[in-house]
Image (cartoon, rainbow, N blue to C red):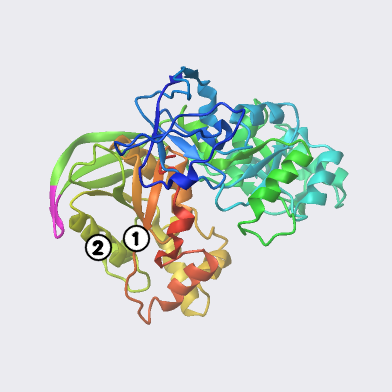
Amino acid sequence: MAFTSFSCHSSSPTSHLRKWKDLRGFAIKPYTPIFFPSVIKLAKFSIVTNRCVQARDGVDINAIVANNTIFDVDDQLISIDESNLNRLVEEFSSIEEAIEDIRQGKMVVVVDDENLNKGGLIMAAEAATTEAMAFMEKHGTKIVYVGMKREDLERLETPLMVDIIAGVSSEDRAATAVALASKHSKPYDFKQPGHILPLRHTEGGVLKRPGHTEASVELARLAGLSTVGILSEIAIGDKLGSKARLPKLRQFANHHSLKIISITDLIRYRRKKVISIERVGAPTRMPTTWGTFKAYCYKSTLDGIEHIAMMMGDVRNGEDILVRVHSECFTGDVFGSTRCDCGKQLALAMQQIKAAGKGVLVYLRGQEGRGIGLGNKLLAYNLQDAGRDTVEANEDLGLPIDSRDYSVGAQILRDLGVRTMRLMTNNPAKYIGLKGYGLGVSSRVPLVTPITKDNKRYLETKRTKMGHIYGLEFNGELRNPSGCQ
């Protein structure tokens, strides 16, 4: 694939267009009629899709590839290997490189997202050795997990911590991991409780849930090995989730000669091979309280659940489209429950799309109670009435805090033509689940609804324990410098 021209928004300050000597660069043409030639270091950019180039290292340029081509400063054609599309972030390895290391029995560093900076060591369980386990224990949080498919967990009857022999040594843990990966193991081979923690892989993998558990299983599968992966979060002195972690994770990976990838990259890699939605029927006119929308029905090929997209106006140019991806909340959306703010957020999002004159609302079904289901949500409400908060109630029931999947929503948006969006959300995790599908978030639009006596503790818990942000100050965190990814 060849790219031969390049352009950036005229709003980018010329002070940001710096020069580097002795390095091949690109001629930059602002959208304004004035031609401003400058040289940009090639390493400062990453080809993200066949339409986008992402600025890095603080170079604040909103850049796109124009006409699928890039010229160098001498107007000579630059040819770029399409495999670069798999490498989103500087110093991150390609997915192919990571798969090959997993195949060879090595471990890799997997970052959940280049903005949240939570990294884990991952390797195939069948390749576990005493030395590898000791390395994980030395540099991890001392907790070793094993990602497994549901059928393997059920076959081995391993809902809790397990050991193959009594002991906590690296050798014992390695032996347990290898045994969990073996198709010949039986339930009586393991002791419970133990010091290895099996985690259930979500069917559909990172396309269904962008987590380390799913990444561990998928990397093992892509490497042609048993679909059981070992994972342990890396502990390098920083507070978990702090912004300073990614540079240190990179340093850690380089120091130990480990490949480092992000789950966003893995989602993109998988997306090239798997399309998990299909349109059902033809779009139809849908008059609503907020004006007339066009309704599209989509069906997930992973679980058969049908979802709906409500579109107003012409969004075919795909850029900076006002978007809301809304998870089904039967109690809030239909009955107007005041325990949550879901119904009010839905109405506010529709209202804002009407005010803008165009936009898309994707309504994802099957995600009741952040993915735990309607019955379990009602049980959780009883626990909340007894004093537990929304996070503690889920944990008391042995359920995930948030198992929602945004991959279907992302694929629906891409099918409708959306490429960059002004995302209506208070939840940073939602943007992570969308961006691996070639969608960019140009800005965040908060959905601030009234606080009531019934939802005050719920909203505060989402803020303090789940990272939800309700003000405009988070725009800088969500904004992708290139506006495309």
Q: Label 2's element?
A: helix
Q: Is residue 373 above or below residue 296?
A: below
Q: Is residue 259 left or right of residue 59?
A: right
Is 289 in front, or is 246?
Answer: 246
Is 451 in front, or is 65?
Answer: 65
- Direction bottom: furthest residue: 453
The type of residue carrying mark 1 is Cys
Distance Cα–Cα, label 2 vs label 1: 13 Å
Q: Is residue 102 left or right of residue 170?
A: left
Is 153 in front, or is 93?
Answer: 93
Q: Position of residue 460 (x, y in %)?
A: 47, 74
* Circle 2 Cα neighbour tier, 10 Å, few/some/many (<14 / 14–19 / ≥20): few
Residue shown at 28% from the left, 63% from the top: 333
Residue 164 visible: no
In the rendered view of the protein, which quadrant contains the C terminus? top left
Q: Position of residue 123 (x, y in %)?
A: 71, 37
Q: Is residue 323 above or below residue 76?
A: below
Q: Earlier in the sequence, mark 2 or mark 1?
A: 1
Q: Is residue 448 above or below residue 215?
A: below
Q: Label 1's element?
A: loop
Is 147 in front, or is 132?
Answer: 132
Q: Is residue 143 left or right of residue 362?
A: right
Q: Is residue 430 above or below residue 126?
A: below
Which secondary structure type mostly characterizes the magenta part of the structure?
strand
Residue shown at 65% from the left, 28% from the top: 97
Is 124 a magenta residue? Answer: no
Residue annotated with mark 2: 347
Residue annotated with mark 1: 329
Q: Position of residue 115 (x, y in %)?
A: 55, 51
Residue shown at 48% from the left, 48% from the top: 432
Provide the residue span drawn in magenta.
286-292
The type of residue carrying mark 2 is Ala
